[in-house]
Image (cartoon, rainbow, N blue to C red):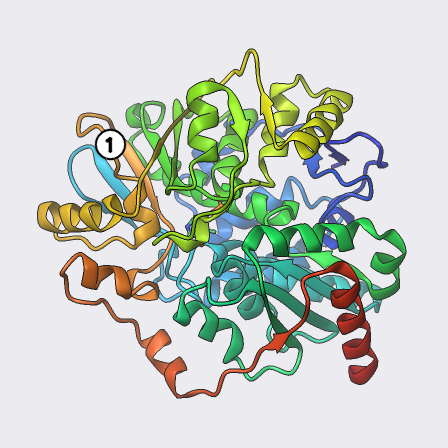
Amino acid sequence: MEFISTRGFSDSVEFTQAVAQGLAPDGGLYLPKSFPDLSPNLKEWEGLAYDELCFEFFKLFATDMNPSILKDCVHKAYSGFSVSEVAPIVSLSNQWKVLELFHGPTLAFKDFALQLLGNLYEAQIEREGKPLTILGATSGDTGAAAISGLVGKKGVEVFILYPNEKVSPLQERQMTCTGASNVYPIAIDGTFDDAQRTVKEIFADLSFREEVGLSAVNSINLARILAQSVYYLFAWLRLKPKCRTKTTFVVPTGNFGNVFAGWLLTKMGIEISEFRVATNQNDVLHQLFKTGEYSLSSVRPSLAPSMDIQVASNFERLLYFILGKDSSRVQEVMTSFRKEGRYCFEKFVSSGFSSCSSSDLEIPELIKQIWDEFDYIVDPHTACAFKDLDPKQASMVLATAHPAKFPSVYEQAMMKVPKADELEALLGVEPRNYQVEVDPDSIRSFIKATLLKTS
Ligand SMILES: *Cc1c(COP(=O)(O)O)cnc(C)c1O
């Protein structure tokens, strides 16, 4: 299977190369050139366990990988989840279901992709004998999940930038208390967008990329998107056939990676009527779906910090389809957007998407409401999904994190603070992080100096 860049100036590549590179050399994002039709497989896939389904799905894309190695990567990725279903579904009412995506090692949905990605990297290093340097920016959960997926992997050094004092203390501990010698969490003075911009600039430096074997774990990596498509398919297959096409998937959204992964299935013969994009007070995407205008302002830190994002990287992938797969138009829109900080889509075809946003006042209220009504505790990101959710609409809400990751919000909601053993265990470990200026030169020098020391 071939993968092409949204910007159209890079050669198409095979799966392993798209995974190793993360971002395409022309600055675009990789997408499959054509999509397999899944419909003939669905009957057979209905009863599969999570990792089996994931393997069958990936086999269609990772055509340049040895299937038994792929199978092993997939199996290992999900064997560390704490429940055997991997992604259990809880019914709140006749209409509302919750897909729990927080039973991985770092208690957020990002484990689904990053546990697998870590194994794919390892397989690649074994095959090619070349070490990899992983660089990413995080608003909290990506960093923790990336680090967990890559801890102790041979031939991999991991550098993760995060905004100092803007991730939750527990998220920070998940990154800084691993004790692993191949992991470098870097606290920067600035926002997530500052961190992400710096990472993107470093990725644009092709000679540096080549020199250190740089790869991305941010949600721009295609393997992450595909790994996330699997749980939508898994949940969809568990719905009664007559409910499948009527169920809305409700997705707490920041970088647009998660919801895009679900939407991608609609290109593969899976009928899903609607995706509801739920944002926090950083509601750029909500405004876009409402008005057609994509307009940046500054990030306002919120109670759902993993969605404190203005520039949603993965939106470019949707844009590619909206603009009729015309790469030069994508290039044009992205350039104009970068210059002006806004872009107005005259005819924004929002087909298949709806949206909502929740303020910081509403988040604790929503948490309390769900608890009172259903005896169910949601984390502050998942809470956003319930804003104005129609009780008569069949909905599958994606629960993106375990409530125990964000304890302070429950005090505001006047509820008991949820706990998780995995997090309690971190409290006894000494944290270690690094401080580096958030500019490309400083980060590059830090990476080079570190690699020299470890080689
Ligand atoms: C990352 C994250 C999100 C946002 O997901 P995107 O793929 O960036 O849209 C939502 N909730 C939680 C808990 C997260 O960690």
Picture coordinates of residue 306, whole percent (x, y): 45, 53
Residue drawn 86% across the image and 59% down it: 208
Picture coordinates of residue 390, whole percent (x, y): 21, 28
Residue 100 shows up from this direction: yes
Quadrant position of residue 336: top right
Q: Nearer the viewer, residue 33 or 328?
A: 328
Quadrant position of residue 432: bottom right
**Looking at the image, is 54 positioned above or below residue 297?**
below
Picture coordinates of residue 240, whole percent (x, y): 29, 31
Quarter of the picture holding the C terminus: bottom right
Picture coordinates of residue 167, whole percent (x, y): 45, 63
**Looking at the image, is 218 positioned above or below residue 390?**
below
**In this rendering, would 93 be left or right of 112?**
left
Q: Secondary structure at mark 1?
A: loop
Residue drawn 50% across the image and 31% down it: 263
- Binning the other alpha carbons within 10 Å of mark 1 as few (below 14), some (14 to 19) or many (20 upward) gives some
**Count of marks placed on residues:** 1
Type of amino acid at the residue the image marks with label 1: Leu
Residue drawn 80% across the image and 69% down it: 131
Residue extending furthest left? 372
Q: Nearer the viewer, residue 140 or 66?
A: 140
Residue extending furthest top? 347
**In this rendering, would 74 be left or right of 380?**
right
Residue linked to disc 1 = 389
